[in-house]
Amino acid sequence: MTNLSFREQGNERFKAGDYKEAEELYSAAIAEHSRSDPKVFANRSLTPLKLQDWQGAESDARKAIELYGPKNEAQAMKSHYYLAQALLPQRHVGEALSEAKHAYTTCLENKDSSAELIGQFILKAKQAQWQAKETARLRELNATQALVEDLLNQQLDRDKKDVEDRFARQEIGETGRREEIEELEREADERRSNIRKAFENSANPDTVERVVPDWLIDPITFEVMHDPVVTSTGVSYERTSLHRHIKAHGCDPLTRQPLKMDQLIPNVALKNACSEFLDKNGWAVDW
């Protein structure tokens, strides 16, 4: 017999990597006496994330946010981040980005160490948002390319369904399922890139896929930089966004160490590189 509560047992199973049993224990905790406890719903939302049950994770994260309420933003921060992670694979990119930015802002306000991790996710979501726009633009330019990409997506869906069916028959475990799906998605991305290169027309620059480099993006606003400055840690930020952050919080956004305006150094080389890129790629301001 164990003296641990269902929630505590769920935490133990989650740490051990047994996500399915952890989910069942969290469900037992909710059924027993925790229907109004946002922490249990937040805990449970992590298990479907690990199991790639995006709708289940979304439902629990939304419930946790609802139970925390608007007066407990600091406590609800992780639930907003979990919701963003659940939304992105479902291609709800705009809402995923909004939820992640909400969590990121809360992190900065509370000097939470999760800011860097969430910042990386926001950049990933921004890239997904831009890729969706690029896909629509390129498809409008070439109907044949659109057809080929549709066939690629249909094949990916069939392959992923086959993996899910094998998982349901217990022919593969959770780790194998996750790894196979990640590999299928990686291969599909590579094939999609090759397809777009094949359809590029050197005589028509509009047919070339447009990509915004990571070094162009401000780590605070996740917008294109125009006047970057660098801190003692070697990280560059858009001057105005870092000034606002220092004025509000008085610290470095990532290290959370004290930071003053006069410690910032203009990153002239990066500013010139940003200017050159934007001069040649005016579309990037809409990224």
Image: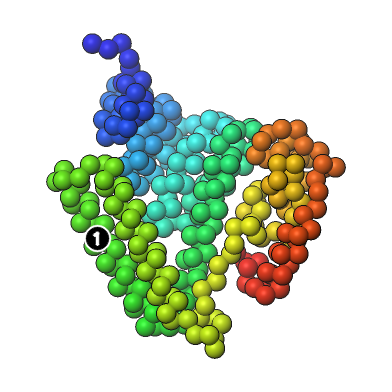
Q: Going 32% across and 32% down the picture, which residue do you hit?
A: 17
Relative image position of residue 96 (x, y in whole percent):
48, 51
Taking depth in this image into account, of 14 and 78 the one nearest to the observer is: 14
| Type of amino acid at the residue the image marks with label 1 | Asp
Q: Going 22% across and 51% down the picture, which residue do you hit?
A: 164
On the picture, is 201 further left or further right than 57? right
Residue 211 occupies which quadrant of the picture? bottom right
On the picture, is 88 further left or further right than 114? left
Please rate how many residues cluster around mark 1, counting C-alpha atoms within 10 Å: few if below 14, some from 14 to 19, many from 20: some
Residue 28 position (above or below residue 73)? above
Quadrant in which the N terminus is drawn: top left
| Residue that numbered label 1 is attached to | 159
Question: What secondary structure is found at the residue carrying circle 1?
Answer: helix
Q: Going 59% across and 62% down the picture, which residue do you hit?
A: 213
Residue 31 occupies which quadrant of the picture? top left
On the picture, is 65 further left or further right than 264? left
Relative image position of residue 243 (x, y in whole percent):
78, 46
Relative image position of residue 233 (x, y in whole percent):
70, 41
Taking depth in this image into account, of 245 and 167 the one nearest to the observer is: 167
Relative image position of residue 245 (x, y in whole percent):
73, 42
Q: Going 26% across and 41% down the picture, which residue do you hit?
A: 174
Taking depth in this image into account, of 216 and 30 the one nearest to the observer is: 216
- Residue 284 in view of the camera: yes
